[in-house]
Structure formats: C-alpha cells, structure tokens
Image (spheres, grey):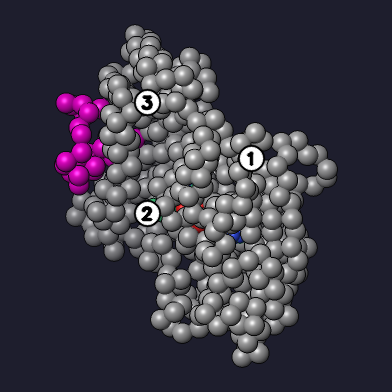
Amino acid sequence: MMDFLSQCRAVVGDAHVLDTAAGMAPFLTDQRGRHTGKALAVLRPGTVEQVAALVRACARHRVAVVPQGGNTGLVLGSVPDGSGTQVLLSLARLNRVRQVDAVNRTMTVDAGCILQHIQEAAAAEGCLFPLSLAAEGSCTIGGNLATNAGGTAVLRYGNTRELCLGLEVVTPQGEIWSGLRGLRKDNTGYDLRDLFIGAEGTLGIITGAVLKLYPQPKASITALAALPSPAAALQLLVLMQDRCGASLTGFELMSRYCLQLVAEQFPQLPKPFAAPHAQYVLLELSSSESEQHAVGLLEQAIGAALDSGVIDDAVVATSVSQSAALWQVREHIPLAQARAGKNIKHDISLPVSRIAEFIAVTGPKLDAAFPGCQLVCFGHLGDGNLHYNVAPPTGVSNEDFLLNQDKVNRVVYDSVEAFGGSISAEHGIGALKREELARYKSPVELNMMRAIKAALDPLGIMNPGKIL
Ligand SMILES: Cc1cc2nc3c(=O)[nH]c(=O)nc-3n(C[C@H](O)[C@H](O)[C@H](O)COP(=O)(O)OP(=O)(O)OC[C@H]3O[C@@H](n4cnc5c(N)ncnc54)[C@H](O)[C@@H]3O)c2cc1C
C-alpha cells in the first residue's frame, strides 16, 4: 500500500494525501454523527486530470473509492466503512464556476462548488439557479447530483436531475467522459448523464456539470393557511395550481404537533394564529412582475379558498420580509425536533392524490403498535414528499424507543409500499437504507441495477456497499 500512496502523492502532492488520524478525522464522521469510518487516506485532487489519475491508481491496486462533497448527506453514503482499506476522495478543491452563458441560460461548474456559491454566481448574472435546501451553505453540486437532491423548489423547477443538462465524469477505469453539453434536446442513444445522477458515487465520480438557469422572479410571497385535514390541504393544492399555475413555487404541509414543537422550542418565533388548527400549509407564489403583483395574486387565491371553505384561516405576508418570517417557522421544525429528542425518521414519497389516505391509515397503525407515539409529519406536499418521523410516547426514553426502529420502519414502509410510494424521496439510499431497498425493489429492478453496476464498475471499486 506504500506503493499506492506514493503514486497518489506523485499525482496530487504530499499536502493533499492525508493519512494521519488527525488529518483524516474531519472527513470520516457522517452528518448526524451516527457512524465514523476508517480510511487508508483522504485524497484531495485539484483538477479533473488528477481525479482520473488517482482513480487509475485505485483501479490498479484494487482500492475502493468513496467520493465526498460537502458530507451533508443523510444516509451514510459519503463516509467509508470500518475496514480502513478504502480511500476517501474529496471533491472540495474542484470549486470553480467555469462559465456562465446567460443567453443559453446555463452555467458550467466544477463538482465541488458549494451550492450557495452557484446560486450567487447565477444571481450575479441576473439569473436564478433554483435548487435550494437547508444545507446549501456546505453541500456541493456534485453531491446534489449524486443524490438527485430535492429541496424547496421542486414543485416549480424539479429535482437536481431536471436542472442538469450535461456532466463530466471520471469512470471507474480512470477515463474522463466529457458530456458537458448545454443542450435541451439531445436524443442520441442511452442517456448516460441520467445514470450518474442519483447513483450516489457508485458508478463514477462527477467532476463537472452544465446546469440550467432561469429568469430571477421579481418577488416571492408566502401565506400560511390553517386547515382541518390533509385532505383539505390537497384540495387547496389543486385550487392553487388551477389559479396560479407555474407561479406556485412552494407548498409545504405541517401538522399541529410540528408547530407546537416549534412554539415550545423557539418561543421567540412568530405565532401566526391565536388558536391551534389540525394542519397548516405554507405556500409560496413567485411573480416575474413585482412584489405587488405576487401579493395580489396570493390574496385572491387565498380569498377563493376561504370562500369555498377549503381553509379555515390564513395569514398572507404583505412583503418579502414577512414572507421570510413565515418560512422561518417551517425551517425550524427539524431544529425543534432535534432539541426535543431523538426520533425515527422517514423521508418518503407518495402519489400526491394518496397522501391524505396514507396519513389517515398509517397513524392509527403506529398508534396500535406503539401506543402514544408522536408523529412529526411535515414536508413538500406539492412534490408528494413527507418527512414522516415517529417520536417516543411521553415517559418513554429516546434510547428505549429507538430499539423499535426496525418495527417502526416496517409499519411505515409497508404502508408506503401499499400506497405505491417510495422509501426514499430525496435523501437517497447510501449504506443506511440498503437493506430496505433490497426488501422493497422488485427482483427485476434490482437485477437491472446490479447489471449496470457490474458493466460500468467491474472491479467494484466505486463506493462499494452503498445502494446495492
Ligand atoms: C440541514 C440539512 C438539510 C437538508 N435538506 C435536504 C433537502 O431539502 N433535500 C435533499 O434532497 N437533501 C437534503 N439534505 C441532504 C444533503 O444535503 C443532500 O443529499 C446533498 O445533496 C448532499 O451533498 P454533499 O455535497 O454534502 O454530498 P455528500 O454528503 O458529500 O455525498 C452524498 C453522496 O453523494 C456522493 N458524492 C458526493 N460528491 C460526489 C461526486 N462529485 N461524484 C460522485 N458522487 C459523489 C457521495 O459518495 C455520497 O454517496 C439535507 C441535509 C442537511 C444536513
């Protein structure tokens, strides 16, 4: 292995091959502190050619490679296993915005660019790169692509997959595939780009991407609606989509318990309603005309929803700053949960039309199995994506309740399957949900996935143990 490491040093220089415990430590623990892996070394290439040369060395020596961007992933995909035989390849030094083409509305970037920097570079050219998530200050576009990240703007702009026109990839053989085409139409055979997006680093290393840009909206305005049930929230979604079309850019469901948690843990935040309601929807409209236009459109739509009895009450922000205050309530749910204690988390998706029924059926099943358990149910309703988290009943410790993880997962995921949903909406599979994937994907699907993996990575050196 000394031979291997000296080849790596010859490629990137001594300073960028870290093999001491202290040097490697910042890279080896996952985002939520659930797993600390061991690595042979951490490699920090600064160019695409260096990535390719390192991967060729890995292939020669049969050393497995774990690609890492911002290490904000939530399914243990970006950290090595406990063997100490894998190398972690950090893309952090590949962080240049290569080109912005405001007429083609595209930008070409290195994979290690931080998402927030990409948003800022687009804005500097008067454009919008719409991918947005709470980890945007530290996650990288390569990680976003590798996990096909979702976020808060999927309803209008789609997942990361929909925001990417071309990729540059280092293959498991250490070749560079330059597919950096800024084309919106390109039907020339199999779409290789789509294979690497969402592959979580198991098929190759993404080193660059061509991203889609959009016009900047002039203003985005939010409202918080109070409703009697998830079924009413679905009626509101249809009403808003019919009236506002593509102007509807956010539609987030939150249960009463979610807002109660936020009020308990963050009493300084605004309390929009005097009395509690069963459900709430935070909705956002964007206008390409003006703030006034957005407020007017939103007030009319909310008025129609009140008149037809779909919603019980609503608070409409009348400025961009009031909108930000309403978003704060939504963004504080995960933080309030973390302060309140541990819970068993699920990032699931369902056909939008079946969400109300799923919630109505699954809650009682959980309550029958774990009497008094608390559901922290919120999410991107417009995308059919729920964060469906199960917290312990009062009086049961977090540690005791977490022992039930497998049983809780079975109730939730069996119900997800029965409703035609997915056990991972936006976070991916990683090492965390690998066994669950094997349980819920059909043998036909699993066999096709294994065949693709074997064809592209016959040595099995690309992020082994993740997904499959
Ligand atoms: C507070 C918080 C909020 C979040 N909100 C959301 C959300 O709303 N929506 C959502 O989808 N996710 C969310 N996430 C999860 C996470 O931020 C995303 O999965 C993000 O896309 C990961 O990017 P990263 O650069 O940190 O990737 P990493 O965590 O470093 O890696 C993730 C996976 O991608 C692989 N990978 C990384 N870079 C490359 C590359 N260049 N080539 C090939 N493979 C690579 C890794 O091997 C790993 O399997 C959130 C996380 C946090 C902590």
Tell me the residue that label 3 is attached to.
221
Looking at the rendering, the stretch of residues picked out in magenta corresponds to 254-278
Residue with the most extreme top position: 307
Mark 1 secondary-structure assignment: strand
Residue beneath the point at 41% across and 62% down? 31
- The one nearer the camera, 406 or 115, is 115
The disc labelled 2 sits on which kind of residue? Ile
Q: Does the beta carbon of the residue at mark 3 sit less than 8 Å from ligand 1?
A: no
Q: CA distance from mark 3 to mark 2?
A: 33 Å
Residue 101, which numbered label?
A: 1
Residue beneath the point at 66% across and 74% down? 54
The disc labelled 3 sits on which kind of residue? Ile
Q: CA distance from mark 2 to mark 1?
A: 44 Å
Residue 9 is inside the magenta segment: no
Tell me the residue that label 2 is attached to.
344
Q: Is residue 28 left or right of residue 165?
A: left
Q: CA distance from mark 1 to mark 3?
A: 29 Å
